[in-house]
C-alpha cells in the first residue's frame, strides 16, 4: 500500500502559500489511481514528490510501511510527460542504462529482459534505432519499457497522452491496464477524462493544491454527480 499523509509543499518565495496543502490518501496494492484537476492544481508536483524529484515541506510518504525514500533505486518508476529518452542512446541502450548502473543483473540477463519487453510492446524492429526516429507512440512505449526494467512496485505516469495523437488514447489505456499487478500501485496524472474513466479504480480530484474528491471511478463518473464537490462537477461539465 502507498500511503500519503499530510503532504505539504510550500512556495520557496512565499512560505505562507502552499503548492500542496496537507494531502492524505492511500492507494492499495493492485489499484490504479487517476489524479485529475485543472492546470495548476498541483498534480505534477504531487507526482514529483512521489518520485523523489521534489522535496516536500512536510508530511510522509510510505510504501508498505517504509518511507518511500528508503526503497531501492528504480522501485519508484516514472514515465515522464516528454518521455525523457536519452537522444544519444539507442532504444536498447536507454533500457539498459539504469539497471546496468545499479548492477541489477548480468549483462546478458538484462539484454534478454530488455529485448523481451521491447517485443512485448511491438518495438522489436526499433531496438537499435535512436529516439529521434520514433513516433510519439513508440517513444511512449519505450519510456514505459524503460521504467519496467527495474520492476517497480510503484509506477507513475505524468500526462501519458498529452504528447500523443488523440487516437492513441485507447492504446495507452490498454497498456496501462495491462501493467496492473497484485503487488504494484499505479498513479496516473492526466487531463484526459477518457483515460481516467478507462483505467482507474479510484479518482483523486485536486484543485488549488488540495484534494476535493477521493472517490471510486463509478462515483466520479456517475451522471448525477452525487457525492462530488461542486468544483469537480464544474470540471466535468466543462469537458462535456
Image (cartoon, grey):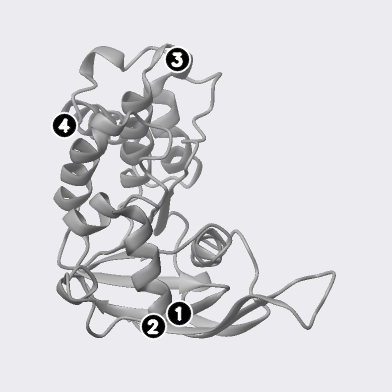
- In terms of sequence position, does the residue under pointer 4 or pointer 1 come before the other? 4
Give 72 or 142, whichever is nearer the viewer.
142
Calculate the distance from the C-alpha at mark 4 to the C-alpha at mark 2: 33 Å
Choose mark 1 or mark 2, whichever is in front: 1
Can residue 154 be seen here? The reply is no
Using the image, determine if residue 158 lies above or below residue 96. below
Badge 2: how crowded within 10 Å, few (<14), some, or many (20+)? some
SS at circle 1: strand
Q: Earlier in the sequence, mark 4 or mark 2?
A: 2
Q: Position of residue 188 (x, y in %)?
A: 35, 57
Which is nearer the N-term, disc 1 or disc 3?
3
Rendered image: mark on residue 25: 2
Image quadrant occupied by the C terminus: bottom left
Question: Which label number is shown at residue 211?
Answer: 1
Q: Indicate which disc residue 130 carries.
A: 3
Mark nearer the viewer, 4 or 1: 1
Quarter of the figure with residue 185: bottom left
Counting from the top left corner in percent of width and height, residue 161 is at 36, 40
Q: CA distance from mark 2 to mark 3?
A: 40 Å
- The answer to whether mark 4 and mark 1 are in CB contact below 8 A is no
Q: Quadrant of the N terminus?
A: bottom left
Mark 4 vs mark 1, CA separation in Å: 36 Å
Cβ atoms at labels 4 and 3 below 8 Å apart: no
SS category of the residue bearing label 4: helix
What residue did someone put label 4 on? Answer: 120
Amino acid at each position: 500500500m502507498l500511503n500519503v499523509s499530510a503532504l505539504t509543499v510550500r512556495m520557496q518565495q512565499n512560505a505562507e502559500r502552499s503548492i500542496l496543502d496537507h494531502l492524505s490518501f492511500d492507494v492499495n496494492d493492485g489499484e490504479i489511481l487517476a489524479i485529475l484537476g485543472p492546470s495548476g492544481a498541483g498534480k505534477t508536483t504531487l507526482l514529483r514528490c512521489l518520485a523523489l524529484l521534489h522535496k516536500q515541506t512536510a508530511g510522509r510518504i510510505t510504501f508498505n510501511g517504509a518511507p518511500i525514500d528508503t526503497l531501492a533505486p528504480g522501485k519508484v518508476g516514472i514515465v515522464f510527460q516528454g518521455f525523457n529518452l536519452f537522444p544519444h542512446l539507442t532504444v536498447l541502450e536507454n533500457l539498459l542504462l539504469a539497471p546496468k548502473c545499479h548492477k541489477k543483473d548480468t549483462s546478458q540477463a538484462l539484454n534478454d529482459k530488455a529485448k523481451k519487453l521491447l517485443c512485448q510492446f511491438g518495438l522489436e524492429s526499433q531496438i537499435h534505432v535512436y529516439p529521434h526516429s520514433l513516433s510519439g507512440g513508440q517513444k511512449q512505449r519505450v519510456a514505459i519499457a524503460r521504467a519496467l526494467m527495474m520492476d517497480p512496485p510503484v509506477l507513475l505516469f505524468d500526462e501519458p497522452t498529452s504528447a500523443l495523437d488523440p487516437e492513441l488514447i485507447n492504446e495507452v489505456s490498454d497498456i496501462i491496464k495491462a501493467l496492473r499487478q497484485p503487488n504494484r500501485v499505479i498513479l496516473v496524472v492526466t487531463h484526459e477524462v477518457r483515460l481516467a474513466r478507462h483505467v482507474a479504480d479510484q479518482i483523486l480530484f485536486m484543485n488549488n493544491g488540495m484534494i476535493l474528491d477521493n472517490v471510486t471511478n463509478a462515483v466520479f463518473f456517475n451522471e448525477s454527480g452525487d457525492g462530488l464537490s461542486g468544483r469537480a462537477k464544474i470540471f466535468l461539465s466543462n469537458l462535456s
